[in-house]
Amino acid sequence: MRLSLNTATVKKATLAQAARLCAEHGITGIGPWRDVVEAAGGAKAAKRLLDQYELAVTSLCRGGFVTTGSAAALADNRRAIEEAADLGTSELVLVVGGLAEGSKDLPAARAHVARALEQLVPYASSHGVRLAIEPLHPMFCADRAVVSTLGQALDLAEPFAPHEVGVVVDTYHVWWDPQLFTQISRAAGRISAYQVCDWVVPLPADMLLGRGHVGDGHIDFAPITDAVRRAGYTGHVEVEIFNQAVWDTDPAETVKTVVDRHLTHLGPV
């Protein structure tokens, strides 16, 4: 599988620096975050930059955070859809959001996600963008994502056509799931992105920053990668790492490690 660099992995690099490093290391894809795109002058300017390096934009991170049902959240997602279209990517990653402040009502939060999809799908489809639901590990259920499993994400996607709503398979978030391989098979035609990083322990105080380079932790990547392939996914493998030590490392060294680990654990770039 081809390799893509999610810009979160080199957090201190600008989009231009990340793009140059991709080109220098034979990486053919990039998955930018919206703040990096904005810092580069907006989506259209970012696309011109990335086109210079002939990089495929594998996804845009991120939309979502719709569990409160607010009009402001829907408006922000429409802007994200427009940015994805301007960048030339068909995949907008959705981190759906956690519980509303003071709430313990998980069913209500999940119902807001379903309603948001109903409202956003027509707008996304008109821009050639698929909404890609990313389930997050259950430890993030309260504050980041009330969708914790690939099965839940597929249940939300099911009312829509595969080209309208997809799912993200992120090894960090789903590796533990006893139903993982069944659900990956079920996801055939709906896999928007395959993201990788490793599960390392002990977790840091900020749980968000507990991801490691592929090979540093406890995830067995080969069977997951094989299952994603068998489900028909032919896109890039996108490396997305949140880790303070990785962020503090020279981005060039980080990208070299990303490529080396990909070759060791996932195959040719």
Image: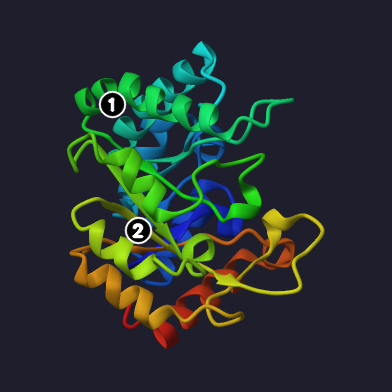
- Up-down: is 186 above or below 132? below
The reply, left or right, for residue 230 in relation to residue 178 is: left
Q: Position of residue 178 (x, y in %)?
A: 44, 70
Is residue 184 or residue 59 the one in the foreground?
Answer: 184
- Up-down: is 197 above or below 159? below
Which tag, 2 or 1, sits closer to the chain's start?
2
The residue under the point 63% across, 32% down is 99
Q: Position of residue 266 (x, y in %)?
A: 37, 80
The reply, left or right, for residue 256 in relation to residue 179 is: right
Q: Which quadrant of the figure has residue 265?
A: bottom left
**Numbered mark located on residue 97 in the image:** none
The residue under the point 23% across, 34% down is 159
Q: Name the residue under label 2.
A: 29
Q: Which quadrant of the figure has residue 200?
A: bottom right
Q: Name the residue under label 1.
A: 121
Residue type at mark 2: give it: Gly
Residue type at mark 1: give it: Val
The reply, left or right, for residue 91 in relation to residue 164 is: right
Work out which quarter of the rendered image holds the N terminus and state it.
bottom left
- Up-down: is 43 above or below 242? above
For the residues bearing labels 2 and 1, Cβ distance under 8 angstroms: no
The residue under the point 36% across, 80% down is 223
The residue under the point 76% across, 73% down is 202
Q: Position of residue 148 (x, y in %)?
A: 51, 50
Q: Which quadrant of the figure has residue 125?
A: top left
